[in-house]
Image (cartoon, rainbow, N blue to C red):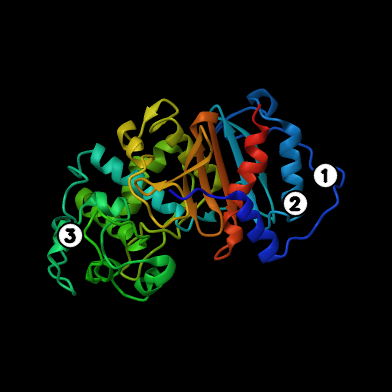
Amino acid sequence: MHKFTFPLLAFLFCAGLGCRNFDDPPAQYHYSPPQDDEHEFDVSSLTAEGVDETKIELLTDRIVREEFPRTDGLLILRNNKLIYEHYFHGYSKDTPDNLFSSAKSITSLLAGIAIDQGFIESVDLPVTELLPEYKSFQNPDARKAQITLSDLLNMSSGLSCEDWYDHTEAQMMKSHDWIKFTLDLPMANDPGTTGSYCTGNAVTLGRIIENQSKLSLQEFSSRYLFQPLGVRQYQWHIMPDGKASAGGLSFMRPRDMAKIGLLMLNHGMFQGKQIVSPEWVDQCILNQIAVGNTFDGYGYLWWKQAFQPGIESYFSSGNGGQDIFIIPSKNLVLVFTGANQNTPKGLQNFQIIQEHILPAIL
């Protein structure tokens, strides 16, 4: 599969977007371990967890100087401990950020929990059977009855839905009923054969979770995910029909994003409690299908990317740089928030990891 090329990324930033050259100034940022008066995390220091403090100070200075523009927050957790937390541009640990499509990865966890709890029998169930309120669809095609939950999770429904180039999401958001809009689309491929990034898949999955659990997404997520994680704030995006969207644009604090990362790092367990099954996490981080050619692979609404041989990651990704990275071989969770929507700068987190964070691991 396509490998993410960091030299090309640097070229895009500097040649295409006009990077400035900086002399090396004296260090302005002096590291101190994060504080956690509310006891949300085990807290340690960079040095105690085997991370070069000087290299992270240099990274912070570069962020402050806007060499990595509009990075609004960065959290580093290693060995299940919060060891670095810094915010920029007036943000703080209590500021909820728009997750954009990182919220899709949370929807995946909700689907796994719905199966664990017995609300949904299997990912192999046909989608249309789980949405009885929709009796018929435009663009009739026998293949629509073959779309399964697994196809929604893998972005392989086969529907003619492509957000990146055909702007299907923008068209969907103009409709009153986003699920009907999605299921009304013509078929472009056989289900399960071709990856195509489609927010409507995640939106439809969310409605199925509601139907099968008899709970709203707000109630279901609060009871089975957010309360067990101690998530303090989560604001769903509300669709025109008054229901919550499982496709993105929800708000969450960076610290709560870090809890999602720890949950994934620890195979569905958080602070000694199994919240989602390890088998589900395994499916999330398995290369299920290729979606575009940007990253190494795609699991159940989670992306895959290797930074170098032996250092693989899986991550949630939101427009502009709202990312949760899990790098198991380094026992790392990284949380980024930013404001680089719809520009190549939204990918600069990969450069930060490759050039600064991984070299700092001792």
- The three-letter code of the residue at mark 1 reads Gln
Residues 244 and 107: in front is 107
- The three-letter code of the residue at mark 3 reads Leu
Direction from residue 312 to residue 155 in the image, left or right: left
Q: How far across and how far down the image is residue 88, in percent?
A: 69, 52
Is the residue 269 above or below the residue 2 in the image?
A: above
Q: Which residue is drawn at the image coordinates 51% and 29% (left, top)?
A: 329
Cα separation, mark 3 vs mark 1, equals 56 Å
Q: Quadrant of residue 242?
A: bottom left
For mark 2, what is the residue? 64
Badge 3 local density, few (<14 within 10 Å), some, or many (20+)?
some
Q: Does the CB distance between marks 1 and 2 fall below 8 Å?
A: yes
**Marked residue nearer the N-terminal end (2 or 3):** 2
Q: Which residue is drawn at the image coordinates 43% and 37% (left, top)?
A: 229
Badge 1 local density, few (<14 within 10 Å), some, or many (20+)?
few
Of badges 2 and 3, the one in the foreground is 2
Direction from residue 234 to residue 17 in the image, left or right: right
Q: Does the CB distance between marks 2 and 3 fall below 8 Å?
A: no
Q: How far across and how far down the image is residue 189, in percent?
A: 24, 63
Q: Name the secondary structure under disc 3.
A: loop
- The three-letter code of the residue at mark 2 reads Val
Q: How far across and how far down the image is residue 283, in percent?
A: 32, 39
**What label sits on residue 131 in the rendered view?**
3
Cα separation, mark 1 vs mark 2, equals 9 Å
For mark 1, what is the residue? 28
Q: How far across and how far down the image is residue 135, in percent?
A: 12, 68
Direction from residue 124 to residue 231 in the image, left or right: right
Residues 182 and 133: in front is 182
**Marked residue nearer the N-terminal end (3 or 1):** 1
Q: Which residue is drawn at the image coordinates 60% and 49% (left, top)?
A: 6
Is the residue 355 above or below the residue 267 in the image?
A: below
Total number of numbered discs in the rendering = 3
